[in-house]
Image (spheres, helix red, strand yellow):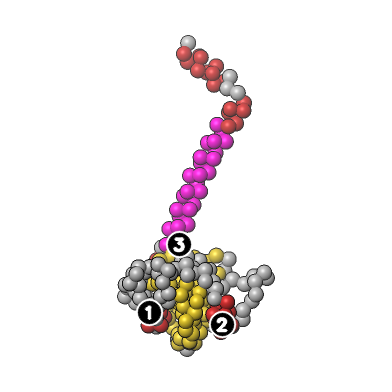
Amino acid sequence: MKKQSRRRSTRGMATWLKVVLIAAGLCFLGLIGMGIFVFLGYQQLTNPVKVRETANLFMTISDPLPSGFNFAWGGNFMDSPFVVIVSPENKAAYTFFSLPQSANTTIVTTPEELVGKIAKEGQAPSSPGIASAKKLKVSSQGTLNIGDQKMPYAIGHGDQAGNGGGTVDNVFCGSIKSSTSGKLVLLMVQSIDLGPTAKPMTIETVKKLTDSITKF
């Protein structure tokens, strides 16, 4: 009797309830699939081998990296690769990314124009690798030799990545044009030390990594 009652109960289930249960099951499977996709995507973004492959798309850097430096993450979205290299020893994150060009944005054609625009407007570009300073109060500008190219740069204090409201310089912005793709590449170096004893960003800190780059 019990088995027969159960069969009748199942057959007598309202159609709308069957649809809801089926939809719920499909949503659950979809969430599992999405979770796997996100996990695999994250694995790709943080895999040092894959990140180096991305770096090789737009620069030539020593293999292995200088001591104390590690590939953190990177990717290539819409033909705009980016790479984040972190140095806990120097307490800095180095983000390289190729600037996408859009019809809705002002196209800057040279590295000098880009760095000049950053310095004049006091606005650091948003990088995909690490939270960027909203405002940048530039304290110094210059050029940095990388391989046979010169990278114009600006160093300043970013209010978002500030040191407890202090004025320590903690952001480096430099730009160079890729000799292969012709695209502008931006390098942002930001201090990951937000403590009261954080040291200012210096060109020597930047050169500890850029000296291992021979070509863009």
Q: Residue furthest front?
A: 165
Q: Check disc 1 and report its element: helix, strand or loop.
A: helix
Mark 3 touches mark 1? (CB < 8 Å): no
Residue 76 x, y percent position in the rendering: 52, 66
Residue with the mark numbered 1 = 205
Residues in magenta? 21-46
Tell me if mark 2 has few (under 14), some (14-19) or many (20+) residues whose alpha carbon lies within 10 angstroms of its own. Answer: some
Above or below: residue 84 compared with residue 27:
below
Mark 3 touches mark 2? (CB < 8 Å): no
Above or below: residue 1 compared with residue 79:
above
Task: Say which amino acid is labelled 1.
Answer: Thr
Residue 15 x, y percent position in the rendering: 62, 26
For the point 50% across and 66% down, which residue is it? 128
- What secondary structure prevails in the magenta region? helix
Residue with the mark numbered 3 = 45
In the drawing, does residue 190 fall left or right of residue 185?
left
Residue 206 x, y percent position in the rendering: 40, 79
Residue with the mark numbered 2 = 116
Query: In the rendering, which numbered label is found on residue 160?
Result: none
Tell me if mark 1 has few (under 14), some (14-19) or many (20+) residues whose alpha carbon lies within 10 angstroms of its own. Answer: some
Q: Residue furthest right?
A: 103
Mark 2 touches mark 1? (CB < 8 Å): no
